[in-house]
Amino acid sequence: MASSFSRVLSSKRNLGILSVVGGSVTAGFLLHREHLSAGPSVRRLYPASAEYPDLRKHNNCMASNLTPTIYSKLCAKVTPNGYTLDMAIQTGVDNPGHPFIKTVGMVAGDEESYEVFADLLDPIIKERHNGYDPTTMKHPTDLDASKIHSGQFDAKYVLSSRVRTGRSIRGLSLPPACTRAERREVERVVVDALAGLKDDLNGKYYSLTQMTDEEQQQLIDDHFLFDKPVSPLLTCAGMARDWPDARGIWHNNEKTFLIWINEEDHTRVISMEKGGNMKRVFERFCKGLKEVERLIQEKGWEFMWNERLGYILTCPSNLGTGLRAGVHVKLPRLSKDPRFNKILDNLRLQKRGTGGVDTAAVGGTFDISNLDRLGQSEVQLVQTVVDGVNYLIECEKKLEKGQDIKVPPPLKQFK
Amino acid sequence: IPMAKNCHNDYKMKFSLDEEFPDLSLHNNHMAKVLTKEIYGKLRAKSTPSGFTVDDVIQTGVDNPGHPFIMTVGCVAGDEESYEAFKDLLDPIISDRHGGYKPTDKHKTDLNFENLKGGDDLDPNYVLSSRVRTGRSIKGFTLPPHNSRGERRAIQDLSIEALASLDGEFKGKYYPLDGMTDAEQEQLIADHFLFDKPVSPLLTCAGMARDWPDARGIWHNENKTFLVWVNEEDHLRVISMQKGGNMKEVFRRFCVGLQKIEEIFKKHNHGFMWNEHLGYILTCPSNLGTGLRGGVHVKLPKLSTHAKFEEILTRLRLQKRGTGGVDTASVGGVFDISNADRLGSSEVDQVQLVVDGVKLMVEMEKKLEKGESIDGMIPAQK
């Protein structure tokens, strides 16, 4: 189907060479994309000092890094799609802090945001990703699941295993900034590709605007349905605009591979199973991701990726792999041990309640997942989770027998 | 004012009309009833000098398909010029919302409180409190959906200066939302003066809660009968209120206070936004004209359950709300009764309707208490 959108046919390592399919409008659009710093300035009625936000009561990464000097330097800049610094930081200005976590406080409106606002985003990325320096370091990508060892957990402890990430479609703005047309194009591109998945990945798309009541109830029962964001972290960044237009859920018939379309990112890709077979979950994850990538490339699209930041997503906290691999695991004794948090820290794991990022644990069952996203590959992070969860289960077993446990030495940050 | 380059809108023009037109199939608000592809197509390339576009105007209506109690407008203005640049959309909405008001109609402004007849004798056994509010926008600044932090702060600075010069019955104090003490905050809550960050998606989706609480605040006089909100849904919301039924006094204070404030802003070369077609220009098209809501909290437990209650209100050109305000239901038979009209009649006209209508309804309530019929008292359509 002919589209008015540009399609990039080059491989992701040859950004300089762009082939354009489409009319002259798209050619002009693509050429414009190359000249980031030459973008026109927005009119400023007031000097930067009059516009600088009041961040005195704020505690997020944006507030920690946005000095008046940086604001002054960046406030008149605009990406080729028209996204500005004020738009990018609005969520952090509107949400001074969060009780459980230090939030990032800033989003990207498009791929170019990470270049145009690098003076602010690079230090934020470094702070959030534990010292990863995007000006000097390179991010490794590795989706070869065969490298994972010891990836099957004791099912007496591990109730479920899950791996998620996000992917953005290059050439289209991200959820904070996308127009209705762009959002609908993301839906079309992805749903088209998913229709080509076969065998154990064969599945069906459920559009939020068109699903029947029965379908909706089934998706709720399966815990698959996502709803309009209510968190002000997301709504203040504009991600809920035009809801539920062009939003939907795709899953395979076996309900082990699931894709959210146009929620916080263009796509969120989730592989999951009951029980402790993390290796199989990750195998399906990698296979599915590579298949989807191949299918969109056939039509001339690709994912946003570069070797400095890995996969490009809306929130800077999800750069790199965008990967959260985790389990729901029963650790009633270990979780009461005063050394629990230190053990998790040293294993480079984080705990959450079983309701997700903003929740508390119930009945000694925790969501345990990797802390890191950027600077290590998918394989490395999943192996970290595998090794870490195995260690935690060993601790729990020891405590059951009345034996003592040891705090493991801290893992090296970047491998 | 030089034309702002709206890069985002320029970028959006590369996509087709069909692809950008919102899905309004499940919507029920004024914007959704009026917006056709033709109108959207005509307006989508436009931008006001400050950079406000039709998508900005309609976002709140796209995001909020309908409301259980009220037919919402579904759009906002970002600046004074919005009402001109997007008249193809806003004129029909204004007509729908304001009883057929035509693009050629002229609006009458009358803030001469002496023209109000009666209003000092509403029975305080029934009328618990009386209140008149309006909004004012300050010329030369964009409106709350669109303004930047710099503009909002300039509006606050100007407002503080203007209000500080008031004296006599209007001598008062300003309380910035981000600078008040805990004691001040508790007192303002106890007085029912404190406004909080908007939670209604009607407002948040229009961008009015951005940067909260930066440059927001409350000013009130020492007597606590005259109150000004700065930078909430409008630049200024001006409120005159007191317990009991002396609406005449409330309206006098309202008119005198407003005119004093207007004089001061004019001296600073920032008068209020007004024109002879739309009257006072405010953020929401529903508040054009007088922007005035004059009302009472009144006990009508019998009348409110009478079969003809709604009809009586309609004929009197009044509306009911719960005592919590626009989004609420009534409690214990106490209703907030106010004028339904804003545009096409003057301040005096509208408050007169409230005074006359409430007086009549209290008499009806008394009749019903005695077990008598009110059929002979049902008014003709005003």
Image (cartoon, rainbow, N blue to C red):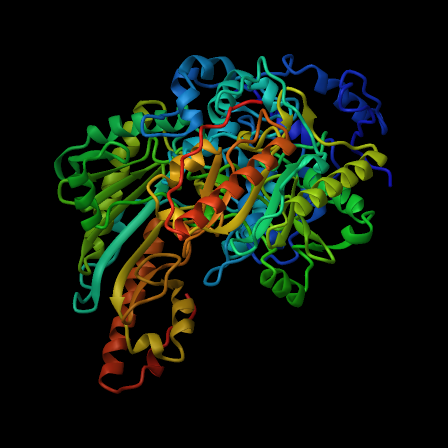
> Image check: B203 left or right of B218?
right
Q: Is residue A240 visible?
A: no
- In which quadrant of the rendered view does residue B53 lie? top right
Percent from the top left, x then y, of residue A387? 55, 38
Q: Which residue is painted at 78% across and 53% down in the image?
A: A200
Give the tally of numbered discs: 0
Percent from the top left, x then y, of residue A42? 56, 20
> Image check: B278 left or right of A6?
left
Q: Nearer the viewer, residue A58 or A53?
A: A58
Quadrant of image for the N terminus of chain A: top right
Q: Nearer the viewer, residue B5 or B253?
A: B5
Q: Nearer the viewer, residue B190 or A118?
A: A118
Q: Is residue B184 visible?
A: yes
Percent from the top left, x then y, of residue B321? 36, 62
Q: Is residue A207 above or below residue A140?
A: below
Q: Is residue B339 above or below residue A167?
A: below
- In which quadrant of the rendered view does residue A4 lie? top right
> Image check: A142 left or right of B228?
right
